[in-house]
Image: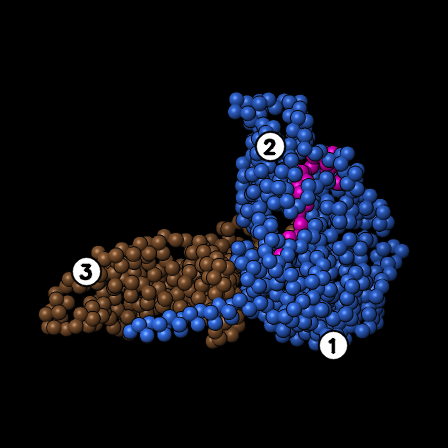
Chain colours: A blue, B brown
Amino acid sequence: MRARLRFLLTLSLTATVAWGGAALAATPDDTLVIGYNRAANNLHPGVNASLPNIWANMLIYDSLVIHDAQGKAHPALAKRWEVSKDGLVWTFYLRDDVKFHSGRKLTATDVKAHFDLWKTMPTATKIAALEKTDVVNDTTVRFTLKNPTLVFLSMISQTEWSYSGIPDSEAVKKYGQDYGVLPESISGTGPFKVTGWVRNDRIELARNPDYKWGPAFYKNQGPARVEKVMIKTITEEAARSAALERNEIDMDISLSEKDAPRLAKTKGLRVILQPKNTAHHIGFNHDKPLLKDTRVRLALMYAIDQKAIVEAVYNGYATPSVGLWATTVEGHSPPAEMAKIAPSYNPARARQLLDEAGWKPGSDGIRMKDGQRLSFTAYGYSEQQANLLSVVQQQWREIGAESQLRQLEYAAWQKAVTAGEHDTSYTDGTHSTADLSYWWVCKSMPYPNILKRCDEATDRYFEITQTTLDPKKRIQAFQDMEKDFMRRAAMIPMPHTQWVVGTSDRVADLELHPIHGYFKLLDARKTK
Amino acid sequence: MLGYIARRLRATVFVLVGVSALVFVMVRLIPGDPALILAGVDASREQAAEVRRGLGLDQPIWVQYARYVRRAVEGDLGKSIHSRRPVWREIRDHFPATLELTMVSLALAGALGIVVGVVSAVRRGSALDSLAMVGSLAGVSMPIFLLGVLLIWLFSLYLGLLPTGGSPPCLFCVDHLRHLVLPAITLAGVSVGMVARLTRSTMLEVIHEDFVRTARAKGLAERLVIYKHALRNAMIPVVTYMGLQFGVLLGGAVVTEQIFSWPGMGRMLVEAIESRDYPVIQGAILFMAAVFVAINLLVDLLYGWLDPRISYE
């Protein structure tokens, strides 16, 4: 009996060790495994605005042009381009050595086919200015615009959500609605090609060995240094961190700020930071009588201590903002100029402004005017935003203002703010250029203009940015608009966040992009 | 028997029509505009309206429902708004993973729960009984989410024995089984406790019945008395419960699949709800309701086999 027991014990221990040993095996040497919190659903560029699709498409496709991390446009599939004097005709000259993953050569016909189809897709707003696309010859394509605009170049850059990635028009024709859905249908010109796709689980990519048209801002313009990439969907934050610690993935692209300090100290792991191109802010609903007085809005701006928010909410992984735009966004104002204009933390000044506006402290410390409390709602759509708004709630309370937090799920938030139910709302904004100011013009009411502010000056500045052919005039108009927002307290800028990326220390030369994280992965490699 | 099945199938049609109408209306009551999610935050109003028109969402709800029912009758559950794939293909790709997880969990819950319940009943009042009942109470009380995270911490991070989640494409490989262990235990957690408690209480009733006493008086071995006579009779409410549990586990799989990144219907449904993919939500819930109804019918038919006294006429 004892011998049998000993045998069973030995057997189970051996099985456990074998089982565990297998489980502890690291990711394969030739594969970079990336963990992400959501799954892609369609890899046809422009079909929808889902981020996981956009990120995968950055690796699978290329566009005519691409912007670097500093917002400068670089040739990609186009060697060069020309703009007519009236700004209406844009001619792009394509490289003649580009091949799709299918082996077909890229021609101007593929470019035209994609732009014609894109105009019918849900994301067509980006090319609203495009009248028509013409094939001049195999390597020349001509775009005619409805109105002259410099923005066109940004909108057709791959940096602009990768909608402009050019798919193989023959494959699109062959597969129809199944293009971008069936793994075998997908054919781009990017550094990686799709080799497998288990929906809601993983996308498997293999290096494109023919690739030699990488953007100039990468050290490596040839085939990617990693042989394979696997994008794994791991929805739960805790599970993703655990997977990184166990070497089941090499990279967690959306590491939570609360886990970052612990993982940075974990042997074999690193935390890489990259400032994002953000314009996060708390927007005022200018339709609400309580917030119509500029002095009240300015007071609420002066009450905000961004350093405290950075520590309490982001664990130090963010930077206080001076103006609305991060300094890597094209069109931002110089920080020194903004520091003179934008209200910064000054609770005494905040109290003074509220006194001047007639809001006097009540018995419980909350200010009153004509029997009305200085009390309003603050909307947000994520747990992190709720955390931030609860810190802001305390800071506003210090000056006698009361806010009630409303954390909704994103789509519900979208509906509530479109209907104007909010008094204030946190909004994330990430963009390569200040063209995101589209959000705040009159024609964007009721959504995405949730400031509910139709302002003549804002519309005028925006009009200049969209129609001028003088880049300096465009930047100046963006800067004037930003300063005007701060002077007239249109919204409260919030800290600029960062990409907090956890990687195994086997990942080397990883360069991150301020908007798109890992972007095209041309330089990254994996050491043994 | 055939008449009984026909009657049940007729009732099923009404159940499914009811479910489809309810889900159709409810998904449209959830705040959020699929067109805006599809087109992106910077879509113009005109563009969003165009997308809405393209999806048919500008039509009155009854027109939309009539169109949906007409297509559903023809076997067409529509296309996903986001992936543009037919909904049946989405279901076909995701359901096997959920079925696998649910069946393994159910088998685990059944096997473990029945053994614990029988042992508890036979050794009523012993330390083993107390331990089993405290354990089952803990299982019933613990939220799936907490149990899942605790198991990841213990078996993946601390002991390093099992992977944190995911599902390798190879179905019959050891790696696949290793990935299945934690989600299956998590999903079975609640049911094990309930099955154990139910088995224990029904066993306690049955072992005092006359026929058990008779069996003992005839000199049958105690093991045969318990497993052949008592357990078979005690199983009827347990089987009923486990049939219902299948539906509960299908629902519980939504949370479990999220925690363990298991690529099943639960994950698909959560993605669809977040992106307001109406056709996928409707199709998935209708399909799950149909599966639930079918399993219940199967359980009812199983009674006859377990207890010959039950007649379907």
Q: CA distance from mark 2 to mark 3?
A: 64 Å
Q: Quadrant location of the N terminus of chain A?
A: bottom left
Q: Is residue A325 magenta?
A: no
Q: Report if the CB atoms under discs 1 and 2 are less than 8 Å apart.
A: no
Please name the residue shown 27% across and 55% down the image. B130
Between tags 3 and 1, which lies in front? 3
Residue type pointed to by label 2: Trp
State the residue in front, B84 or A4.
A4
Q: Position of residue A370 (x, y in %)?
A: 57, 22
Chain for disc number 1:
A
Residue sitting farthest toward the bottom = A103
Q: Earlier in the sequence, mark 1 or mark 2?
A: 1
Above/below status of A139 relative to A329: below
Above/below status of A289 relative to A506: above
Task: Check disc 1 and report the residue beneath it.
Answer: A104
State the residue in front, B213 or A174.
B213
Q: Position of residue B274 (x, y in %)?
A: 54, 55
Residue type pointed to by label 3: Glu
